[in-house]
Amino acid sequence: MTMKPSVLVARAVFPEVLDKLAQHFEVTSNQTDVFWTQEVLIQQLQGHQGALTTGSVRIDAVVLAACPDLKICANMAVGYNNFDVDAMTQAGVLATNTPDVLTETTADFGFALLLATARRMAEAEHFLRSGRWDRWRYDMFAGCEVHGSTLGILGMGRIGQGIARRAAHGFGMKVIYHNRSRLDAATEAACGAVWVDQSELLRTCDHLMLVLPYSAATHHVIGANELAQMKPTATLINIARGGIVDEVALAAALRQGTIAAAGLDVFEGEPKVHPDLLALRNVVLTPHIASATIRTRLAMAHLAADNLIGYLVDGKPVTPINPQVLAT
Ligand code: GLV
């Protein structure tokens, strides 16, 4: 009898996904979800061929060097900036993520955050709950228009396209986008979106949606200079990664009225939120929940598990990030 491969599930996950993994692997899990330092992670990874990770689990050259048995890390997220993919490829460790299954759910949330921010829903709700509402007033929580306005999308992958479709077809918005690579004409038409350069995007949009992957190249791409180009009535929505925005510059821009409001689901030091942001009323803050519906989170966890099973059992991962590893 051959020994089952062994996998580590580094964060708590749906019990049914652990059961699925247990049909193929020896499974060690962190179901109590205790915080692991890098040192503990390395200890826990010893002897395991696979790991199921989330965005909070950093896999870098130090971890890889200390874990020679590791063959695959399956991230339960579409973003994978927690992986040093080059180091993984060099070490012959496959990386996988969870694209597609979260696209529409995440696009829904981006739109919800846009609506909540432009229409000042969080601020208005806090006001009501605080007992200060004594009568209707003509300008009470008057916000910015969403329908018919111009949405700027920075990054135009699957999620950006989902948001564009909602904006163009559901809310009659004019959609402009900027991305390194331009979409083909048919996809642009289906999204109702027009490519512009970054400066035009910043200057002309009423709402700016950030949906680009985070890497060294996109670190703080929105800083004081970029914010200064935006309309004073504009809103900024970030559902990508916190590090894309210089949060100190953003807080200053929100304080000074350089832009009107921001909706943020992601933060550079999360779960810590910069105190300058917490002090502002014109910002809607949510704890990294854009993909958080039960159905989608289950689909993400199953896809991560299927990548482990696909690779370690059959040699065929479902959604590899560095397929070069398969060729070696
Ligand atoms: C969540 O942030 C993801 O990348 O899936």
Image (cartoon, rainbow, N blue to C red):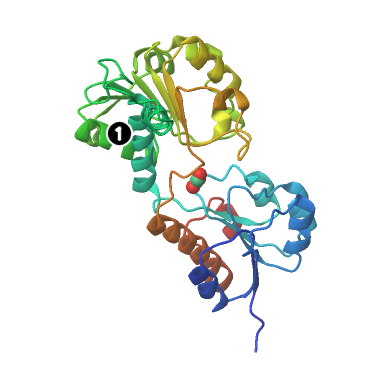
In the visual, does 303 lie left or right of 72?
left
Quick one: label 1, few (<14), some, or many (20+) residues within 10 Å? many
Considering the image in quadrants, where does the N terminus appear?
bottom right
Residue sitting nearer the eye, 190 or 184: 190
Q: Which residue is mark 1?
A: 164
In the image, is residue 87 above or below residue 3?
Answer: above
Q: Position of residue 314 (x, y in %)?
A: 53, 72
As displayed, is residue 171 above or below residue 101? above
Residue 143 seen from this side: no
- Point out residue 149 in the picture as x, y percentages from the top left corner: 26, 21
Q: In the rendered image of this protein, does residue 326 appear above or below residue 48?
A: above
Q: Is residue 215 above or below residue 231?
A: below
Q: Quadrant of residue 313 in the image? A: bottom right
The answer to whether residue 42 shows anywhere in this view is yes
Quarter that holds the C terminus: bottom right
* Residue at point 58%, 48% (across, down): 55
Dot 1: element: helix
